[in-house]
Structure formats: C-alpha cells, structure tokens
Amino acid sequence: MSLVFTGTFVCAQESASDQLSSVITDGSVALDVRYRYEYVDEDGFDESARASLVRTRVTIKSGKLGPVSALMEVDNVSALGSENYNSTENGKTEYPTIADPEGTAFNQAWLRYSAEDLDATLGRQRIVLDRGRFIGAKPWRQNEQTYDAARLQWSGLTGLTIDASYANQVSRVFGPGDGSNPADWHGDSAFFRVNYDFAEDHNIAAYAYLLEVDAQSGFSAAKTVNNSSDTFGLAYTGSFSDLSLLARFATQTESGDSELDYQASYYVVELAAPLGPVNVKAAYEVLGADNGVGFGTPLANGHGVQGWADKFLATPGDGIKDAWVSVGGKLGSVGLLARYHDFSAESSSVNFGREIDLQAQWTINEWLTATAKAAIFETDEPGRYPDTTKAWLTLQLRL
C-alpha cells in the first residue's frame, strides 16, 4: 500500500512539474517595432508639424497552466530628433497636433481562463467590437487604447456568441501621463454584444455599449463626463456571391453625470465587390445630432473611418453624412488603395468638404512591412474644418 501511495505521489509531483515547465516552454516573446514619420500641414498654423517616432512593443505570453494563461505587454514611444509637433502633452501648441506622446506603459497585462466554449479575461486588455466602430483599440496611434476590464466570451450554442465586458478604466492614446487631455478615463462602463450566424455567410448582432466617464480635476466636462453615453443597436453582415453587405443602426442618449441632453441616431450601409483585378467598396454613413450634440464614438478606431485626415473624430453638433468609395488592389507585393470622401452635415445644408486618401503598402517579407500614405482634405467650411494635408512613412518590424 505504501509503495502504491509513494508512486502516485511521485507521479503527481512530476505532472505538476511538467505543467509548470510548460508555462515557460510553451510561452512566447514577440517584438514589434514601428517607426513612423508623420507630416501635417493645416491652415491656421504658421508651421507644419513633423514627427519622427518609434514605438517599441515587447509582448510576453505564457503557456497554459491547465486552462489559465497570462500575457504582459509593454510599449515605449520615443521621438527621434526635434519635436516639431503638438503631442497634446509637450505644450507645443504652435504646431498642428500629432497625438503621440512619449512614454513607457503597460499596454496589456491579463490572466485568461479558456474552456471549450468560454474565455474569461481579467486585467488590462485590448477590446475591439463591431470592427472597432464603437469600441476599439485605436491601433493607428503609437500609444494604443486598452481597457482595465473583466471580459466573458461564450459560444456554447451553434452560431451564437455572447460577449460581455465591464471596464473601470480606459487607458487612452493620450497617455501614459496627462497632458491637454486625460491619459485615462475612469468610470463604470459595460459593453454587451450578442452575435448570431443565422445562415451561412449571414450574421446579425445586437449590442449595448454603456459608457460612463467620471469627472476629473483639471479637465472640462467636454473632455470627461460629457462623453458618457448609452448606445443600443443592431448590425447585419452578409455575402451574396461576390457581393458583401454591412448594415448597422444605433441610437444613443447621454448617461451618467453627463451635462448633455440628446438622442441621436447612427446608420451605415456598406457594399463591397471585386471588379476585375481590384476590390471596390462604397458606403453611406450618417451620425445624427440632437440639441447641438452629435452621436459620439470616443472609444472607436476613429482613424480611417471618416478619412485619414481625422477631421471628424468628434461628431459635429449638426451631425455628419459621409459618402465614400474606395478602390484597392495589388501590384506584385505592393498593396494599393485609393478612397474618396464627401462630407456634409446631417441636420443642415452645410457641406464640410472632400477628402482623397492614398496608400501603398509593401510587404517586404514575413516580418517587415513598409507603408506610404497621404490624406488631402479640402474644406467648404474653413471656419470649422481647415484645409489639411497629412503624409506618413511607416516601417514596421515584427519578430
């Protein structure tokens, strides 16, 4: 009997030792270095902005200890050479804004429990919902947006996925330290999304995004509590042969301690199809307004949604209508994209302007990518949205 017990104990010790060893041996370390040169010329400024910035990201992911794994990710953003731009933190307001403050911070740090149909994640994490249109990570900026949150993702029934998160802090692109904008938002926010594949290549989703932002000393309500809102909506995605369709609708009201009083709607219809060697997309997107307040998307992946010039990251008080068309394709290993936007107000006859966006992206090899892109915005309302030209050169290394 004692020999059997001793043998069982030794085997258990060896099994536990193997599991602990696999946490390290099955883990990974990744390096992501992104250099970007950004140029901004905007009417109203005597000087153009020029930023030469590098973001270095180190990601350490463990192997699994039973159903549990962990991840830690650290970012550093550093300027190379002169800082001839307004980072929102460096005080150089004589230049146009390039919202990439320098600093080092934990971008992610989480524990995850994974079962067959359930993932539960606790800690600082990346959350992207509805393709980032309402809840996203803003990956374009060098300092990414992440959430201190508890998140559950369940897919226990065929075709059905439930995604629920509670977040008490948003680590924003303006961090890691406060500048002219808060680096972090605190408050009790909840994000819910139910996704159902009701047929092959056809999906419908219902969502509720309840954003609460607390007041913060030294910052106005416009930069804090007035971003609190409740958003409810539906989305459909589907494919009909070569034609892809996205349709989304939402309604939004103020919430929490917001000083605002409004009820605004949002909708978009987007079509995509191949046309010979190129892919063509076209969309009509409307963010409404009420009582001088536009439908807000402060947590969205804003860059590129309504033009790369980023003139409409905050929705105008008379809303916005965005009609756009894009053409993309490949020339060897280089991806090419061109997009045209026409912007106008939703609740008035005002035309805001037009924008042309151009991009060439060269996949040099599996770990190195080079990108050149530009945005040219021409205004019809110079008192509100000045003419702006932006250009970027990016080199990204992933190991």
Image (spheres, rainbow, N blue to C red):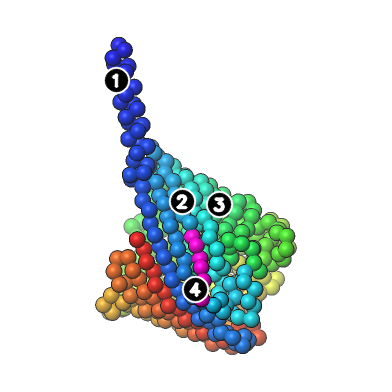
Neighbours of disc 2 within 10 Å: few (<14), some (14-19), many (20+): some
Type of amino acid at the residue the image marks with label 2: Met
Answer yes or no: is residue 116 visible. no
Residue type, label 1: Gly
Q: Residue at x 29, y 20 (%)?
A: 7
Residue 124's place in the image compared with 359, above or below, is: above
Residue drawn at (43%, 71%) of the image: 35
The answer to whether marks 2 and 1 mark residues whose Cβ atoms lie closer than 8 Å is no
Mark 2 or mark 4, which is nearer the start of the sequence? 2
The residue furthest left is: 332
Instruction: Classify mark 3: residues with Cα within 10 Å, few (<14), some (14-19) or many (20+).
Output: many
| Disc with the residue nearer the chain's start (2 vs 1) | 1
Secondary structure of the residue carrying numbered label 3: strand
Identify the residue at horizontal 42%, vertical 74% (top origin). 394
Mark sitting on residue 381: none
**Which residue is identified by label 1?**
7
The residue wearing badge 4 is 80
Mark in the foreground, 3 or 2: 2
| Picture coordinates of residue 63, whole percent (x, y) | 37, 44
Which span is picked out in magenta?
Answer: 75-81
- Amino acid identity at mark 3: Asp
- Work out how far the residue at label 3 is from the one at label 4, CA to CA, in angstroms: 30 Å
The Cα atoms of the two marked residues, 1 and 4, are separated by 61 Å
Badge nearest the viewer, 3 or 4: 4
Residue at image mark 3: 148
Q: Position of residue 94 (x, y in %)?
A: 64, 81
Return the residue at label 2. 72
